[in-house]
Image (tube, rainbow, N blue to C red):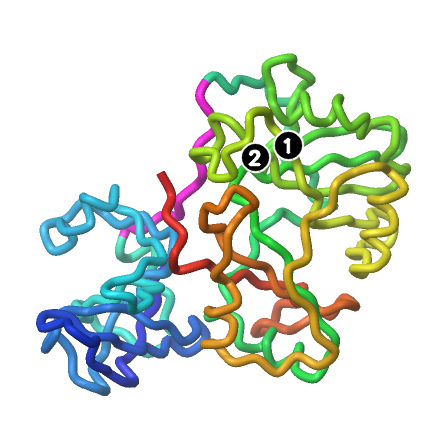
Amino acid sequence: MVWVGFVLALAPIEGADKIESATAVCGRGGKWMGVVPKGQFREGDPCFVYLPDSIVPQSPDLAFMEKYKWRVRVMRFRGTPSECLIMPLTVAGSVGDDVTRMLGVTKYEKPLPAGFKTEIVGKFPYWIPKTDEPHFQSVPEMLDALRGKPWYATIKYDGMSTTAYKKDGHFGLCSRNWEMKPADNNVMWQLARRYKVEEVLPEGYAIQWETFGPAIQGNPLGITKPDMRVFNVWDISNARYLDYAEGLMLCDDMGLPFVEECARGKSFDMNADDLRAMSVGVYPNGEQREGIVIRPMDEITVMLGSQPARCSCKVVNPLYRED
């Protein structure tokens, strides 16, 4: 969540006397844009880069973050995107060092909706990948792997990640971190029953969807009852995500709503500014959407350092505002 980097470039912000735009590079932490006080940095200066969803410690040097509830978010200042928090380096470090623990920073977790109660069966199944899309700025390897290939973008909903699976005859339903017992007051179970997921999901598969609606993350879509959109289909037996067309077809067969596509192309050639611009858009009710997710039409595995990862990343809409 926090990397040591350096200020690559500074640029003025039209009509602003006290702030300017900074581009920071963090080695394996990626390349980010942030708005900083004018004169705080010079090009080449070392810095800390706090990524979105960092929960910063309540310290005097970060007291200005109290009005943001101590959480780093993608924002705009005088129309200029600020994707991260850039702060002066206060300890020795090298570009690309991960200093999250050293600085006492934790990751924001979305709260459960009011009145949401559930009993836990056990931990999230280890044979299913958890849902956690990386920000595109932190995974340039994915954009490089995507270049020249057919791609698509889908709308990112702001809700609760939900996973349903069927393995060895057992049907399980999970939140981001836990498998949950059936409960009438659990909105995830309500949706699973409404769409008859246990009946239609084939043996050996898992689906992952976003649960959204009243009392969930401020209900940005303004809908009157909870709903869902599937965004992943995982083949448990073969340990792979289905390609886009395969996932769509299976969800159509099951009668489950798949997340809406908002763009596609035959050969990916976008830069960072193109992606930021494409992330801006609205939900059907006219409210700004959370962002988009970019993927290849056919699944690709990318090496991030020594670790393989699915080629899939998110672009947060800088105009989106959470309650």
| Image quarter hosting the C terminus | top left
- Are circles 1 and 2 on residues that touch, CB within 8 Å? yes
- Would you say residue 295 is visible in this rendering? no
Kindly indicate the quadrant of the structure image that contains residue 218.
top left
- Residue 51 in the image: x percent, y percent? 37, 60
Residue 321 left/right relative to 183: left
Instruction: Report helix, strand or loop for mark 2.
Output: strand
Residue at screen point 85% across, 44% down: 252
Residue at screen point 31% across, 78% down: 23
Q: What residue type is labelled 1?
A: Asp
Q: Residue 227 carries which label?
A: 1
Q: Give the range drawn in magenta.
A: 104-114
- Residue sitting nearer the eye, 252 or 112: 252
Q: Is residue 117 above or below residue 198?
A: above
Q: What residue type is labelled 2?
A: Phe
Residue at screen point 78% across, 56% down: 241
Q: In this view, does 228 lie above or below 84?
A: above
Q: Is the magenta stretch mostly helix, strand or loop?
A: loop
Residue 148 left/right relative to 225: right
Residue at screen point 16% across, 68% down: 90
- Would you say residue 120 is visible in this rendering? yes
The answer to whether residue 105 is magenta is: yes
Q: Is residue 99 above or below residue 107?
A: below
- Residue 119 in the image: x percent, y percent? 59, 18
The answer to whether residue 313 is magenta is: no
- Residue 195 in the image: x percent, y percent? 78, 28
Q: Which mark is residue 12?
A: none
| Image quarter hosting the N terminus | bottom left
- Residue sitting nearer the eye, 26 or 247: 247
- Give the residue at mark 2: 212
